[in-house]
Image (cartoon, helix red, strand yellow):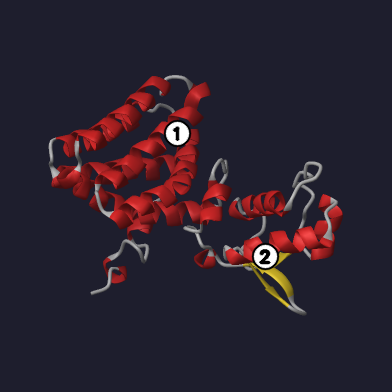
Amino acid sequence: MSLSPLPSLPARADAHELATQLARAILSGHWATGAPFPRELDLCEHFGASRNLVRNALARLTTAGLIERSAGRGSWVCDIGEWHLLDPQMSEWLTGLDTPHPQLIREIHAFRLSAEPHVAALAAQSADAEDLSRLERAYRGMCDTAADSARYREHGEHDAIFHAAIYRASHNLVWRQMGHLLRPSILALIAQSHQQATTLDDSLERHWRVMEAIRLRQPDEARRAAAYILERTAADLGLSMRHITEHPLTSPKGTGA
């Protein structure tokens, strides 16, 4: 339940700022899932915050499924399966997260592997001129920032915009909203993978293949090219594709009827 590595809050911080700091610590794996969460009094003492401010912050974490609280038992960190990753406040907490929880990385990547090839195929069937222009702008931004390691964060932002543009180009309202909500998660995953990559040339070539398949209205090729990107991401993250493809979200047993 250690709080020592966590920085103090700025003067006059509010519940939103405290919740953000605590949420990002959980999302980074500072506390193991299932582990006890610090007591209210310990949080008050460490952050120099009032009991009311701490309670409001903890209520936000509870609403997002990060912690569970029980009278007489205290609080504990929920299992990742209980985290509400599509909660709008979760999107804010994930933005700029440098070291996401390893299991969270696997879960996000498994979802992308199950969804993005299909969404890319839809985009190849439905993309209009504006969609193609959006993809091209994002891709140019990736190219312009790929060679400079000092601009890797900027490169990652263009990369996330590229993937969000694929979801948008599907012209399906649900997928479009999903792309918007997933963008911080995808950005966190991209940032983590870029830390492991020695060069981004191969990544650029794989993204170009997706963009070309969408432009040429080739759904099958777009599906294959999107999966090709995610294979590279898995390699950069040190993830086993066998482990990912056997994940409940992506394995045949998990697809339902």
Q: Quadrant of residue 95?
A: top right
Is 83 in front, or is 113? 83
Q: State the CA–CA distance, disc 1 to disc 2.
A: 32 Å
Q: Which residue is mark 2?
A: 59
Q: Residues within 10 Å of mark 2 (few under 14, many from 20)?
A: some
Query: Percent position (x, y) of residue 168?
Result: 30, 45
Assign a secondary structure to mark 2: helix
Q: Kindly identify which residue carries mark 1.
A: 156
Asked if 147 appears above or below 130 in the picture, the reply is above
What amino acid type should be assigned to the residue bearing mark 1? Gly
Quadrant placement of the N terminus: bottom right
**x and y, in percent, of residue 226 in the image:** 26, 44
Residue 245 at what x, y percent from top left? 32, 58
Q: Quarter of the image holding residue 31? A: bottom right
Q: Nearer the viewer, mark 1 or mark 2?
A: 2
Residue name at image x 77 percent, y 79 percent: 72
| Rendered residue at 39%/35% (across/down) | 159
Dividing the picture into quadrants, the one containing residue 37 is bottom right
Q: Is residue 22 above or below residue 160?
A: below
Residue in the picture at 51% in, 58% down: 87
